[in-house]
Amino acid sequence: MCRHALILLPLIVAALELLSPLFNHGGSLVCLTLIFVVFVIAPKRCGFRDWQRVLPSALISAAGALATFLLANYLNLGPLVASAVVGLAGTSFFKERHQLVLYLGAFVGMSSDARFPSLTLLIAAGLVGGVLWEVLNETWNGVGGRLGTVAATAVLVVLLTLGGGL
């Protein structure tokens, strides 16, 4: 039940971005603390025990993000076509569970190269998205927009903590 509260994470990150001039670089520390809580404390408190699925999901999400980003920005396919190509490729090579994680990564990869001048930041956002997916896997079943919300949260968290803001 407490995993449902993680829906507030994008709102908290957005509020920190709006209030960041008041923090004098303290906002990054707050975001890092939130990441620690989300990835370490919350799963233990909420009973999330299956950590063997986290690494494959994080890697698949990062691969989807990287593939979409490269297709969209370096081959000039645009984010929508690149995301569709990655999604279609995922249906051919992965089982349903990993297809969703790959498509989550594709949503992360739809970001502009102005936001991610470094591929390292993009890969970090893909990894965070995969971990968030596993933490939130059994929550919000049947609710539309779950993949996009998790992807947006991963992008916001990485940009605010490692990328210097939006």
Image: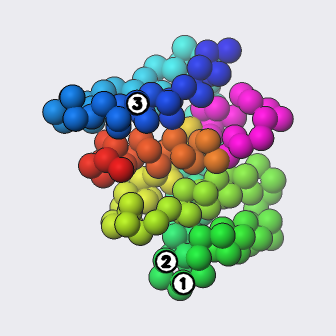
Q: Where does label 2 land, which residue?
A: 73
Query: Secondary structure under badge 2?
Result: helix
Q: Give the x, y percent position of residue 159.
A: 37, 49
Alpha carbons under labels 1 and 2: distance apart: 5 Å
Q: Which mark is residue 76?
A: 1
Q: Give the x, y percent position of residue 115.
A: 39, 61
Q: Where does label 3 land, which residue?
A: 15
Q: Quadrant of residue 133?
A: top right
5 on left or right of 32: right
What amino acid does circle 2 point to? Asn
Compared to residue 158, the image places residue 42 above or below, namely: above
Label 3–label 1 contact, CB within 8 A: no
Label 1–label 2 contact, CB within 8 A: yes
Q: Residue at x 50, y 30 (%)?
A: 11
Disc 3 crowd, CA 10 A, few/some/many (<14, 14-19, 20+):
few
What amino acid does circle 3 point to? Ala
Q: Which residues are magenta?
A: 133-147
22 on left or right of 148: left
